[in-house]
Image (cartoon, rainbow, N blue to C red):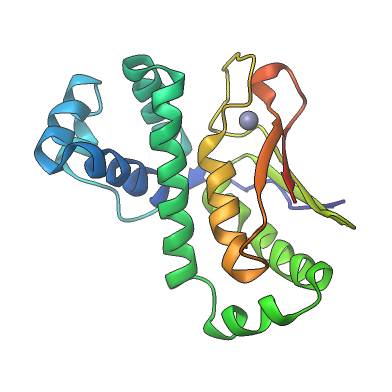
Amino acid sequence: MHATPRAVGAARIGPNSIIQTVGAIEEERGYKATRSFLREIGQDAFAEQLPTTMIDEVAFISLIGAIRTELGVEAAGRILARSGERTADYLLAHRIPAPAHVVLPRLPRRLGLNLLLKAISGHAWTFAGTGRFSYTVDAKGAILSLADSPECRGMTATQPICRYYESCFQTLLRPLIDQRLVVREVACAAQGNEACVFEVR
Ligand SMILES: [Zn+2]
């Protein structure tokens, strides 16, 4: 099991968590209605301006909580899943070096996954805040683990609810490893598990 060290200092997370979540709401409602919606759910600051630098992860947790309270876990999950896709698209376009797009999919799957997941692990704090990301590569694909996931922190649920991370991982891994792969959260901390576990198959 490869694990990343805990993020040091304040609990920071990348601004994409907010930018892409708001972007996902805009896709459904348009720009203006999204501003009204954000004010209605007490997220006035993001109605005015979106962050451009690292933010306190509490802001992301609070935005998720406000959307869930307003729309319910199911509908909020659809927005969060879309936000995860958008975040992965951003990473693929701006953070994954061009050679990786060419080389990784051509490598044996196990090697490709090891290289990619090691790189993701090194930057995990940028999308997971104080959540702790780790992974194992196995014969069938990989198992990703996120302890203290900001997406379900403090939540109780009967089903896994970390749709943002689930779809972010899938959208990021598909073009770099195998377009047919599926990422599914099979255990969530919201169900009382120690960490959120995502199967890559
Ligand atoms: Zn979870």
Nearer to me, 16 or 99? 99
Q: Is residue 153 visible?
A: yes
User: Is residue 93 toward the left or the right of residue 10 in the image?
Assistant: left
Nearer to me, 3 or 157? 157
Q: In which quadrant of this rendering is ligand 1 seen? A: top right
Quadrant in which residue 46 is drawn: top left
The answer to whether residue 185 is above or below residue 98 is above
Q: Residue at x 69, y 67 (%)?
A: 116
User: Is residue 76 toward the left or the right of residue 123 in the image?
Assistant: left
User: Is residue 170 toward the left or the right of residue 57 in the image?
Assistant: right
Quadrant in which residue 128 is drawn: top right
Residue 125 image position (x, y, % from top left): 59, 50
The answer to whether residue 147 is above or below residue 41 is below
Nearer to me, 87 or 159? 159
Farthest residue to the left: give it: 32
Residue 111 image position (x, y, % from top left): 82, 72
Q: Residue at x 79, y 66 (%)?
A: 114
Q: Residue at x 56, y 43 (%)?
A: 165
Q: Is residue 14 visible?
A: no
